Image: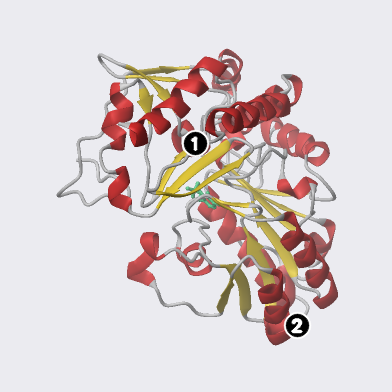
Amino acid sequence: MIWYPYQQMKTMRQPLKITDAEGVYLYTRDRKLIDSVSSWWCVIHGYKHPALNEAVKSQTDRFSHVMLGGLTHDPALALSQKLESFLPGDLNYHFFSDSGSVAVEVALKMALQFYTNQGIRRDTILALTNAYHGDTFKAMEVGDDEDYHFAFSEKKGVVHIPTEIPALEEAFLTYHDRLTCLIVEPLLQGAGGMLMYDISFLKRARQLCDQYNVLLIFDEVATGFGRTGNRFVADLVCPDILVLGKALTGGYIGHALTAANEKVFRGFYDDEDRHALMHGPTFMGNALACSVALKSIELFENENYMEKIRKITEITRREMAGFSDPRIKEIRIMGGCICIEVYDAKTLEGFQQFAYMRGVFSRPFLTFLYAMVPYIIEEEELVTVLETMKAWFRQ
Ligand SMILES: *Cc1c(COP(=O)(O)O)cnc(C)c1O
């Protein structure tokens, strides 16, 4: 049988069986549901997109996969070349992997080895409270979410700080000569509860990282490709290492990217074999994933996605204006993300079924009721999602 994620298998509700999916809709045998979660935030163009389907099909007819060990191929080369102009700054060195968690591992490994290659001993990582960076072990350590990883709470060499400038400055004063990197989910902390914070924190972080020669890592696995209302937060403040995943392939195939800048790459580039980056996921640079990622980026650029996202933000603000309820702690809106945080998780019990009856698929967690819709959603469909959220509190 399937062992499902984040579930007590003994008490789990039967998952919905999906038989088809197209645009923003998931189809069960007898229902049609707007996917307000975009399949864990990755299906930005909706399901069964003709251009993305075609990208996968045509590459399948050539080859689906060859390894990057000693080999290379056009889909990976073309994607890397596209990323050179598409990504900000000099994030021109592209390490591919098969999932966001692994791409985070690679970023942390780069940061650590960047210093050991220079004979500098540093052993501490600065991260944020409520951070989520994936479920592999180092990613769990830099994460700070007991609700996900309570069984593994021992932290070695990781310091967590809140998203407040005084705490940031104090951490640099105390730990600067031991820090390899500061890793953050910029502006929007997703799985930690859709927490939003100000760009001034990241600007100060960039200054301090420069001052103390500490690498700045942006985990934009969730925030990349417009989710915060910026193409990338890295467009506003440029990190040394950028991690992308989720929407990279438009949600078609698991793939991720760790993009390093010139400075980081130079830390590995010399005549010493042992200064090489020793990592190589079997499926890195998978040809189907690269082909569909390239097509996804073209759609994102050519079909005015930033405008679509602006429209989503505008409609969301309009629909939520003036809405409140004593059970609600805060309503947060940023780009293509809305979160209603309640005081008590019990308030959301039954919402999933309630939404299902109204034609919406939703998956609240803990005290967070949220939507991260596919960007191709129509106004009327988005209003249905938001009305459903409001109706739950009004009944
Ligand atoms: C989802 C997520 C990850 C992990 O990505 P996977 O592909 O699930 O391994 C890492 N960082 C952030 C910010 C995420 O949202």
| CA neighbours of label 1 inside 10 A, class few (<14), some (14 to 19), many (20+) | few
In-front residue for pair 58/187 = 187
The label nearer to you, 2 versus 1, is: 1
Q: Residue at x 64, y 37 (%)?
A: 335
Q: Residue at x 77, y 71 (%)?
A: 272
How was the colour assigned to the protein in this rendering?
secondary structure
Q: Quadrant of the C terminus?
A: top left
Q: Which mark is residue 344?
A: none
In-front residue for pair 347/160 = 347
Q: Position of residue 11 (x, y in %)?
A: 16, 48
Q: Quadrant of residue 197?
A: bottom right
Q: Amino acid at mark 1?
A: Phe
- Please, is residue 321 above or below residue 34 in the view? below
| Disc 1: which residue | 323
How much space separates mark 2 and mark 1, taking CA atoms? Answer: 57 Å
Secondary element at image label 2: loop
The answer to whether residue 349 is left or right of residue 372 is: left
Q: Residue at x 42, y 77 (%)?
A: 154
Q: Position of residue 30 (x, y in %)?
A: 25, 14
The answer to whether residue 61 is left or right of residue 351 is: right
| CA neighbours of label 2 inside 10 A, class few (<14), some (14 to 19), many (20+) | few
> Which numbered disc flags the more N-terminal residue, 2 or 1?
2
| Disc 2: which residue | 119
Whether residue 281 is visible: no
Q: Position of residue 129 (x, y in %)?
A: 54, 67
Q: Are marks 2 and 1 in contact (CB under 8 Å)?
A: no
Whether residue 150 is visible: yes
Q: Furthest-left residue in view?
A: 10
Q: Residue at x 59, y 72 (%)?
A: 161
Q: Amino acid at mark 2?
A: Gly
Q: Position of residue 148 (x, y in %)?
A: 38, 59
Q: Quadrant of the N terminus?
A: top left
